[in-house]
Amino acid sequence: MTNGTYLRLLRDATRLVRLSYLEFNLEKMMEEELYSEFAVFYRLLHASRMPGCPQQSEESIIEYYHQESLAAGTRIRERLSEAVEDAIKGLGNGLLQHPDNQPLREAISSGRLSPDQFYLHLLRLIYRLLFLMVI
C-alpha cells in the first residue's frame, strides 16, 4: 500500500487493534540519498523474498523477522523489572555522587526530598525514557 511518499507492507493479521506493517519513507530515501535504507527496502521487498503462495507465508524472511522480534520482546519483558531496578540504582547513585549535585544531596539529607519521593522521580524518569525508546 502506498501514497507515493510512504510504502507500507501490511501483515495479514487477525488482530485489528494494532496493525502490523513495515513502512518506508520513499520520498526521504530519494531526497536525502539514503542508500543504506534503500538497500534494506530493496532486500526485504524484492519478489524473491516473498512466498510463492499464501500457504508458504510462514516461510518468508519478513515473517521470520516478525517472529524473531516477538521472541526478543518476550525476553525483554521477562527481564524488564530487573532492568528498571538496575537503572534506578545506577541513575540514583550517579546523581547523588556527581559533584555538581550538592543541592540534591542537601534536599535529601534535610528531608525536603524523601527517599521515597526521590525513588518515584527516578522511576518516572526511567519509564519516560523507556516510552521514548519504544516510540
Image (cartoon, rainbow, N blue to C red):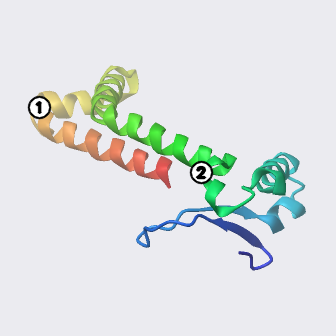
Q: At x 78% / y 74%, what residue is drawn?
A: 5
Q: Earlier in the sequence, mark 2 or mark 1?
A: 2
Q: Quadrant of the N terminus?
A: bottom right
Q: Residues within 10 Å of mark 2 (few under 14, many from 20)?
A: few
Secondary structure of the residue carrying numbered label 1: helix
Horizontal side of 9 relative to 94 (left or right) equals right
**Image coords of residue 24 (percent x, y):** 73, 62
The answer to which of 110 and 132 lies nearer the viewer is: 132
Using the image, determine if residue 23 lies above or below residue 109.
below
Q: Residue at x 38, y 50 (%)?
A: 128
| Above or below for 64 versus 83 | below
Identify which residue, 91 or 28, lies in the foreground. 28
Residue displayed at 28% across by 29% down: 82
Q: Determine the secondary structure under disc 2.
A: helix
Label 1 crowd bin: few (<14), some (14–19), many (20+), radius 10 Å? few
Residue 36 is at least partly visible in this image: yes
Q: Is residue 56 above or below residue 113?
A: below
Q: Is residue 130 above or below residue 86?
A: below
Left or right, 64 with respect to 19, comes to right
Q: Amino acid at mark 1?
A: Ser
- Badge number at residue 27: none
Locate residue 79: give its quadrant. Answer: top left
Label 1: which residue? 110
Residue that mark 2 sits on: 58
Q: Residue at x 60, y 50 (%)?
A: 63
The image quadrant of residue 55 is bottom right
Q: Is residue 72 left or right of residue 40?
A: left
Q: Position of residue 15 (x, y in %)?
A: 43, 67
The image position of residue 110, as x and y in percent, is 11, 31
